[in-house]
Image (cartoon, helix red, strand yellow):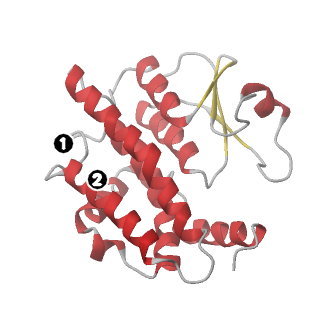
Amino acid sequence: MSKGEVVLLNCWASPFCLRAKIALAEKGVEYEARAENLFWGKSDLLLKSSPIYKKVPVLLHDGKPLCESTIIVNYIDETWPSPPLLPSCAYERAKARFWADFIDKKVFDAVCNIWKSKGEVPETAKNEFIEILKQLEGALGEKDFFGGDSFGFVDVIAIPLTSWFYAVEKFGGFKLENECPKFSAWMNKCMQRDTIARILPDPEKVYEFVIMLRNMFGIE
C-alpha cells in the first residue's frame, strides 16, 4: 500500500530510525531507505530536511519532510490507517501516548548512562535502568503487548531500543531476563514477528558500534 514517494533518511544502529522502519513495515508501505553518515558528513538533504536538530530519522513523503521518530510513527499511522497501531478508543490512545512519552523521556537516557560510564558502571545507573523497565512491566501487565493482544503503537516505540540492551548487559554485568523477566518475555514475543526480526540489527553489531562510540568519546 502506498500513497506517493516515501524516503527515509536513517542510520542502521539508531533505535529511533528503526521505529519508522517497523511502522512502515507493519503498514506494508514501500519506501527508499537512504543511509546517513552521521559522523563524517551529513548529506545536504538531511541538513535541509532537518534544519533544527540535523538528526535522523527524517521521513520524506512526496518531498515533504517530517522529523522526530514518535511524530513520524504517528504520521505513518494516520496516513496509512490499516492496520491501526493506535487503539480506536480515545482514552486508550491517550494512555498509549503517555507510555510512548515515558519511553522517549526515560529509556534511551538510562541506556546511555550505562554505556557512557567510565570504568565500572555505577549501581545507581544499573538500578535506574532496571527500575524503568519494571515500570514498563507494570504497564504491560499480563498482556502479550502493551496495547493488548495486538502489536501496536507503544510496542513500535519501545522494541527498537532493545537492540541496544545486549550492550547494556555487557557493560553493566547483568542479565535482563533475570531482572525483568516479563519485559524479556515481551521482547521475545516481539521478535517472533517478521517485521521485527528482519529489521532489528544484530545485537553483537550494535555492541561493536557502541564500543566504537566509546573510543570516539575517549571513554575507558
Tell me the residue that label 1 is attached to.
Answer: 149
Between 9 and 199, the residue placed more toward the observer is 9
> Residue 143, percent across and down?
16, 49
Q: Could you tell whether 41 is left or right of 60 in the image? A: right
Label 2 residue SS: helix
Q: Amino acid at mark 1?
A: Asp
Q: Residue 37 bears which disc, if any?
A: none
Kindly report which numbered mark, 1 or 2, lies closer to the viewer in this rendering. Answer: 2
Image check: 99 left or right of 67?
left
Q: Quadrant of residue 189?
A: bottom left
Residue drawn where x is 44% and y is 54% of the image: 107
Residue at left 44%, top 26%?
Answer: 74
**C-alpha span from label 1 to label 2:** 16 Å
Residue 188 visible at all? no
What residue is pinned by disc 2? 136
Q: Please give the count of numbered marks on the rendered protein.
A: 2
Report the side of 203 relative to 143 (left or right): right
Instruction: Give the percent coordinates (x, y) of residue 182.
Output: 23, 63
Locate the C terminus and report the quarter of the image it occupies: bottom right
Amino acid type indicated by mark 2 = Leu
Q: Relative to the observer, which residue lies in front, 194 or 57?
A: 57
For image coordinates 24% across by 68% down, the residue present is 181
Could you say which is closer to the camera, residue 77 or residue 165? 165
Nearer-N-terminus badge (1/2): 2
Indicate the quadrant where residue 130 lies. Answer: bottom left
Location of residue 59 in the rendering, given as x and y in whole percent from the top left corner: 62, 29
The image shows residue 217 at horizontal and vertical percentages of: 75, 67
- Specify whether residue 42 is in view: yes
Judge left or right: residue 199 versus residue 88: right
Rate crowding at label 2 as few (under 14), some (14 to 19) or many (20 or more) other CA atoms within 10 Å.
many
